[in-house]
Amino acid sequence: MPCEQTIQGKIIYGPEAEVIEGYVVIDDGIIKEVHEKKNYSANIIAPCFVNAHTHIGDSVCKDPVLGIKEGHYIRRDLSQLVQPPHGLKHRILKQTPHRKMVDAMSSSLRDMNNTGTCAFADFREGGAKGVLALKEALGYSDIEARIFGRPVNYGGKHDISTELEELLENTDGLGMSGANDIDMDILETVRHEALKKGKTFAIHAGESRRDDIDKALSLDPDILIHMTQASQNDLREVANRDIPVVICPRSNFITDVGMAPVREMLETGVKVAVGTDNVMLNSVNMFAEMELLSKVFGIDDRQVFMMCTLMGATILGLGTTGSIQEGNLAKIMIINGKSNNLTGIKDPISGIVRRGRPDDILSVIL
């Protein structure tokens, strides 16, 4: 039985995020037609967000102590919070029962849905068991995932070969912590196995210090995460090698490691997408990332919007997601342009980027 739906309003259309007035025809989950036509709807029809870097296993702990109290202030220490294998999050993950983990991740997936996200990439801790827990949570959700697993046994090349094989059979690739956290021989093995299977190899680099960037680049990664401490020379090399970078502005702010050189990345020609990182530290709300990028970094609003939608889809290989155009999957959020928050905006993209909130969403189509 045909399932055709027509939505009208101001449409953020195509790969250039052009704003047109018209209507979108959806047939069986696919964007069948987009027509430009005058109408009087205040609705804004936008592509859903793609959250390009998360750790949603952290959903089991959302209010951790963020550091060491010194007088009236908290000194934040990234290694104490998230560095494997003994950081706070890893101790919590090891102690969390499977059912509790699945339920916690399911709540974050529902939160993604409610806040306009249609796809995400997760760096899944806990080896094969961690991957299976996420897959179980995804069974209750319409959100698309790219799962990048990581081994738990770093005892030596021989010790992890079987684990890597199992991980690569059940994931889209491998997502590793920084090159200072793991022996380079192990990382080279991990990279080799991912390459052999034709799977993605992604790695954190330059988050709190610059001295792991060269090591990460020597592994020829498919995706780099953070690059907060990258120099101009680093960015030129990344751009020349066409390695995309996923930045996590709120996470870098709260862990006090500095702010990524986003403007320099874009000016150098680096492909940049955005993620919310650890659920332990931040919600999966991509509106909050956009507001920070626009107001604090001073990035052009259209560029910000595309970094949080189409660029994430492109980097993650989600070819028919991230923009509204004929033939793409209908991953769309309908935003109320007359909400108490948005009424009076002149430019739909700037309005959404600078001040949009989840409660402005009327519905999400996945």
Image (tube, rainbow, N blue to C red):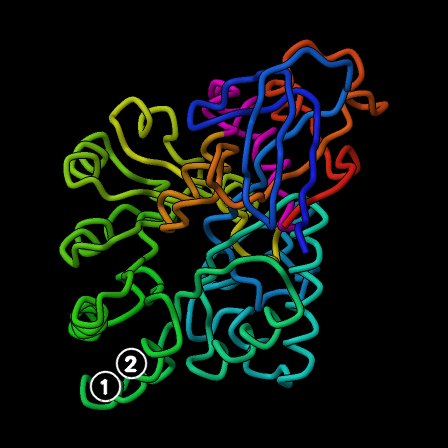
For residue 231, which quarter of the picture?
top left
Q: Residue furthest front?
A: 1
Between 20 and 184, the one lying in front of the other is 20
Please determine whether, in this image, residue 314 is positioned above or below residue 58.
Answer: above
User: Horizontal placement of 159 versus 124: left or right?
Assistant: left
- Residue 164 has which mark? 2
Q: Main secondary structure of the magenta part?
A: helix
Q: Residue at x 50, y 39 (%)?
A: 249
Name the amino acid type tagged 1: Ser
Q: Which residues are magenta?
A: 283-305
Query: Is 290 contained in the magenta span?
Result: yes
Q: Nearer the viewer, residue 349 or 209?
A: 349
| Camera-side residue of 141 and 358 | 141
Residue hosting label 1: 161
Q: Quadrant of residue 177?
A: bottom left
What amino acid type should be assigned to the residue bearing mark 2?
A: Leu
Are the residues tagged 2 and 1 within 8 Å (C-beta)? Answer: yes
For disc 2, the neighbor class at 10 Å (few under 14, some 14 to 19, many from 20) is: many
At mark 2, the secondary structure is helix
Image coordinates of residue 333 in percent, x first then y, are 66, 38
Q: Position of residue 8 (x, y in %)?
A: 70, 25
